[in-house]
Image (cartoon, grey):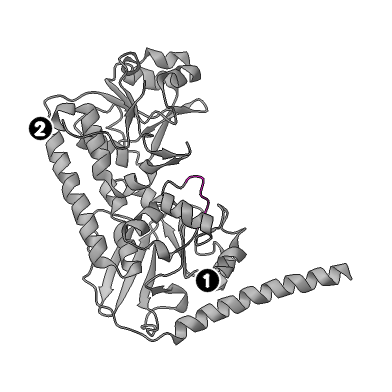
Amino acid sequence: MKRLLNVLLILGALSTVLFSCESHTNKTSKETYQSFTATPLQVKYAKTFSLDYKGDYKVLHLINPFNDKKTSYVLLQKGQSLPTGFTQNQVIRIPISNMITTTTSQTTMMEELGALDAIRGYVDSTYMYSQAIVDRMAEGKIITVGYDITDNAEKILMSNADLVMVVGNSSVTAQSFPVIRKAGIPILSNTDWQENDLLGRAEWVKLFGALLNKEKQADALFTSIELKYNDLVKLAKQSDSQPKVITGFPYKGMWSVPGGSSYLAKALEQTHVSYPWSNTDETGSIQLDLEAVFAKGKNADFWVNAGTTDNLQQILNKDSRYGQFDAFKNRMVFNHNKRTRGGMASDYWATGNLHPEIVLADLIKIFHPDLLPDHELYFYQKLQ
């Protein structure tokens, strides 16, 4: 009898989920189509997505940086008929109103476009810097879906979500998250973290603009960021000095230094400094031991992005040999953990992704303080 009761309960739960999905689909199909005309957004820096505007609909192309394959989605106004050349599983109904996000960068872009109400779920509040998001999660306005989207598929289905944005990686394919896909909820892989240019990362705000029908706001926001960023690049070139800089911190015995073609190496180049691994070709990190980093970076003038350390003593506690770097001896170690919440959530990975002009201003202030005498460090702090 108990086993029968359990079976009935499971069937009831599945029926509720399926009814919810059917209602979601019917609701979309019955909505009256209202035409929307937007000024087309031009993608200039980002390499892993592009946008086409086709009269009364938009086409989003996602370029997988791991295999160069392109996946296209048609962005249709709610109630609009599907144009020829697309299948139903390529459709994203816009404007998005119930989105599941999975990174602080995604939520920051939604928040700055005035679309907090369109965020329906997020993974967990522990690493969320935005107090507005944390408060909404506490109030139940934004549900907690956890880090394993597959295991929490039922919760997502019950949330009436109209889009799930996941972190794109080499293992995410068109066959990933089968339960969510079968329910007709589109899934987008966000690969902003694979852009090798700070402006390319920030330009993902245009994708959110297209999803929310907020092209004008997204374009104005990014244009402002771009202008300030490029002005700072020009300013840095005026410096007579070119200090030597190392970055990163060892983890489990290996020190990850940015490859010469990575976004951080490019940013360092734009701040007019000498970076020991600038001539390497890697777009990601290079794994080195302490001896290899010491050989090239012992005499560096500055050390930035020193892991999660809050002071110099914490660095020595890890390994006394770190104290032999000139940057450490001269107390020129800086970390991007000035703005944190609860010691876990960092605004550097949230606001910093969307506003690289502030990141660049901080770096210029550190390396060439005379060029920005009135700038106060925003994300970075000098370790004492």
Q: Which numbered disc, 2 or 1, marks the residue that appears first in the sequence?
A: 1
Q: Is residue 198 left or right of residue 94?
A: left
Q: Is residue 11 left or right of residue 275?
A: right
The relative height of residue 39 versus residue 354 in the rendered view (above or below) is: below
Mark 2 residue type: Gln
Q: Position of residue 226 (x, y in %)?
A: 20, 50
Quadrant containing the C terminus is: top left
Q: Is residue 124 magenta?
A: yes
Identity of the residue drawn at 14% across and 27% down = 370
Query: Are the residues tagged 2 and 1 within 8 Å (C-beta)?
Result: no
- For the record, the magenta segment spans 122-127
Identify residue for label 2.
238
Percent of width and height locating residue 272: 18, 32
Residue at x 28%, y 40% (from the top left corner): 359
Badge 2: residue crowd in 10 Å (few <14, some 14–19, many ≥20)? few
Q: Residue at x 38, y 12 (%)?
A: 324
- Which residue, given by chain and number where applicable, does mark 1 sit on? 160
The front one of 52 and 229 is 229
Q: Residue 340: give x, y in percent of width and height.
A: 41, 38
Residue 291 vertical position relative to residue 19 in the rendered view, above or below: above
Instruction: Give the image location of residue 43, x and y in percent.
Output: 24, 60
Residue 102 seen in the figure: no
Q: Secondary structure at mark 1?
A: loop
155 to 250, vertically: above or below:
below
The amino acid marked with disc number 1 is Asn
Is label 2 or label 1 in front?
A: 1
